[in-house]
Amino acid sequence: MAAIQISNVVKNYKTLRALSGVSLTIEEGEFFGLLGPNGAGKTTLISIIAGLNRADSGSVSIHGHDVVTDYRAARQKLGVVPQELVFDPFFTVRETLRMQSGYFGLKKNDAWIDEVMHHLDLTGKADANMRSLSGGMKRRVLVAQALVHKPPVIVLDEPTAGVDVELRQTLWKFVARLNREGHTVVLTTHYLEEAQALCTRVAMLKAGLVVALDSTAALIKRISGSQLVVQLSSGRLPHSLVSLVSHPEELISGSKYTLRVGEYADVEPILAQLRLAGVVIDDMQLQQADLEDVFLQIMDGEK
């Protein structure tokens, strides 16, 4: 059974089509990345998964429970960390987490609350009022709230936006542990290095459509390959290599070029053409392409 099944989901806001028939299957135990530029439809999709919004057509189920017709069971299986800092200013951290436990019918949950606070470095703030916390600490509490009922599916919507490096490391260490223990994790983030390091599979949204879906490694290998960066001290790039230039503006600016190469064996023919053209190489680097390269190529419509 899939952790999340999304089938042909369409959502319109008056004249704006936010989602145009999105279909995804997120398997149990996956660390799944949902990526896209602002306005791609990521948050709308998450709102529909969480039951905070309704699709105009299509369906979403969590562990087989439809988020509309079987919403109680679906929400029991799900923990969501929203982008916005939403909190009740009248309660302490511990009181907030106890109330969240109560929403899910958990009466004796203090041991797990203590463990979650420990792993998110919130123990020292357990009795602090929510309104007295910094933005980073409030975000930690949002993460704790999402985890307080031990949901098998965790959705993190930009969880590290605007927070310090320490929180990022603390959060990812804990979430990676939960994933190893069998929890399904869905992550949206603009920090593509995080997605590359954490996600085993990635879907990319553009204008409400899924435009790429594959394992992270396969996307990087299939779409981008590697890049050969050459700095020329004299001469110009021969015409036979122009089609390999990743950044067209380099053809105007002149001596430094980033060339797409599929594999290491492609490097020597490139060097041979440079030698034949009589150019002198001042510096050369072979760089492994990353998820950011893939993302930019897809969003620019190059691939």
Image (cartoon, helix red, strand yellow):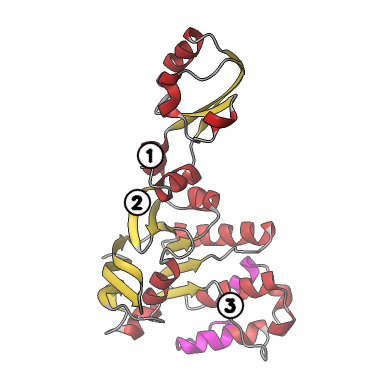
Q: Nearer the viewer, residue 206 or 46?
A: 206
Q: Residue 269 falls in which quadrant of the image?
A: top left
User: Where does residue 17 sit, x and y in percent of width and height?
Assistant: 34, 71
**Secondary structure category for the residue under label 2:** strand
Judge the density around disc 2: few (<14), some (14-19), many (≥20) Cα neighbours within 10 Å: some
**Secondary structure category for the residue under label 3:** helix
Judge the density around disc 1: few (<14), some (14-19), many (≥20) Cα neighbours within 10 Å: some
Sequence order check: which comes first, mark 1 or mark 3?
3
- Residue 223: give its label: 1
User: Residue type at mark 3?
Assistant: Ile
Mostly what secondary structure, the magenta segment? helix
Q: Mark 2 — residue?
A: 212
Q: Nearer the viewer, residue 198 or 34?
A: 34
Nearest to the eye among marks 2 and 3: give it: 2
Range drawn in magenta? 97-120
User: Residue type at mark 1?
Assistant: Ile
Q: CA–CA distance between discs 2 and 3?
A: 38 Å
Identify the image quadrant of the N terminus. bottom left
Identify the image quadrant of the C terminus. top left
> Who's the residue at 69% across and 60% down the image?
164
Q: Mark 3 — residue?
A: 113
